[in-house]
Amino acid sequence: MIRTLKLTALASLMFAAGLATAADTIKIGVTGPYTGGSSSMGVSMRDGVRLATAEINKAGGVLGKQLQLIERDDEAKNERGVQIAQELINKEQVVATMGFINTGVALASQRFYQEAKIPVFNNVATGSIVTQQFKAPEFPDNYIFRNAAHDSIQAPMIVEEAIGRRGFKKVAILADSTNYGQLGRDDLEKALTAKGVKAVAVEKFNVKDVDMTAQLLKAKEAGAEAILTYAIGPELAQIANGMTKLGWKVPMIGSWTLSMANFIDNAGPGGEGARMPQTFIQEPNTMKRKAFIDSYLKTFKPKNNRIDSPVSAAQGYDSVYLLTAAIKQAGTTEGPKVREALENLQAKVEGVVTTYDKPFTHDDHEAITANIPVFGEVKGSKVVYAYEEDAKRGSDIRQKAAKQPAKQAAKQEPAKK
């Protein structure tokens, strides 16, 4: 009897200790692909999140509590993302989640957070629709935020680079069959139409395809002078390798994923010269960026001192500081109040990508505007600034452009000939 009472008392103490531990932490979900073809992005994002979290916890945490990351590998699968969302909300009771590398996974999963009124930070997924999934008036409040350059920014940049800056007359589009690839392809075609250009070939392929010969031959036969891409690293490498096999080399200009390590490494010499929009290039051109890069390399020791996906790591890192700034301002982890704080952040947040000064409003949940990204280029197995003027001004902090009233914007628009 006495032994039973002692065991019961011990169990009660352990349970109470468990509750105290849970009460002393703020749980934040981190979901992304840590295995498979998208893992360059997922692991880099997760490690950026870990780095920021460690810094914040070392400085005392938030609201007197330590941040606790609840990490899950969604394997870039929509159905797995849905399972994780339900687990993080119902079992782990996270106060927010960050991640979502793949647009399809984001669109399938974030509705559960919207219903639960829990903020989500998309710090990598770039599909233009991601933050528009829950729009007014059907949804008075939107719980989906993003600090990545969405595709409605990237696609016009890609087209301007190809048509405007480099003067190509004929371009082909090669995009994968995922939501990311096909939504990006649609954005590219819209941007080309705005320039009065139609792609000479528009080709699709599946994730894990290893032979792009058929698609490339159609582009070549159509006279393409450049290939515009929307896909992820492994398949992008197959495009570059396919051109090498055909003895046909034209520039690759595509979305930011051309900066992934598994494109650069698998494409080898065939990937040299590929260009892509970047919010962050691994250059220590400010004190904040140098500290981030040095800490990342020391902590995670990536091969060749090169972050696999610098953009993912930087945006993951910044998202933690944005979220915690909102929690501090709200004075609570309650979802609606954290959302309101994000929409009206009073303090500036110094990040790696930029310094965030009122990055969100109730109707605008995009922290990145078109003036922030620059063009990167694969050179010597890493991504560098594509243009010397951007490299020279790399230490300049590009901040979010103020939204102009419609009438003022119309006045400033150049007259059309």
Image (cartoon, rainbow, N blue to C red):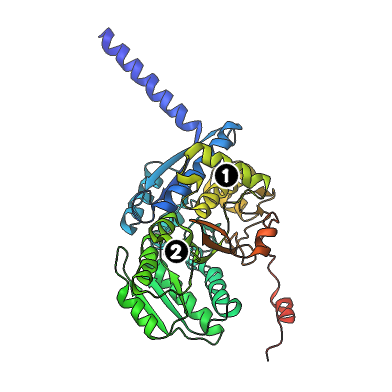
* Residue most extreme to the front: 247
Q: Residue at x 40, y 41 (%)?
A: 92
Please name whichever residue, 337 or 352, is drawn nearer the observer in this view of the structure.
352
What is the three-letter code of the residue carrying label 1? Answer: Ile
* Residue most extreme to the top: 2
Relative height, residue 370 to residue 200 (above, below): above
**Residue 218 located left or right of residue 136:** left
**Observer able to see residue 267:** yes
Please state the horizontal and vertical placement of residue 50, each as a whole percent of the image. Answer: 49, 41
Task: Classify 10 Å Cα crowding around label 2: few (below 14), some (14-19), many (20 and above).
Answer: many
Find residue 271 and name its label. 2
Please state the horizontal and vertical placement of residue 389, each as a whole percent of the image. Answer: 68, 64
Please name whichever residue, 52 or 362, is drawn nearer the observer in this view of the structure.
52
Q: Quadrant of the C terminus?
A: bottom right
Question: How far apart in space, not on screen, are marks 2 and 1 (Cα)?
Answer: 24 Å
Please name whichever residue, 199 or 377, is drawn nearer the observer in this view of the structure.
377
Look at mark 1 in the image and give the residue it sits on: 293
Q: Quadrant of the N terminus?
A: top left
* Residue most extreme to the left: 1
Q: Quadrant of residue 79?
A: bottom left
* Mark toward the start of the polypeptide (2 vs 1): 2
Q: Secondary structure at mark 1?
A: helix
Please name whichever residue, 241 or 25, is drawn nearer the observer in this view of the structure.
241
What is the three-letter code of the residue carrying label 2? Answer: Gly
**Residue 180 located left or right of residue 355:** left
Q: Secondary structure at mark 2?
A: helix
**Residue 390 located left or right of residue 8:** right
Q: Residue at x 48, y 72 (%)?
A: 251
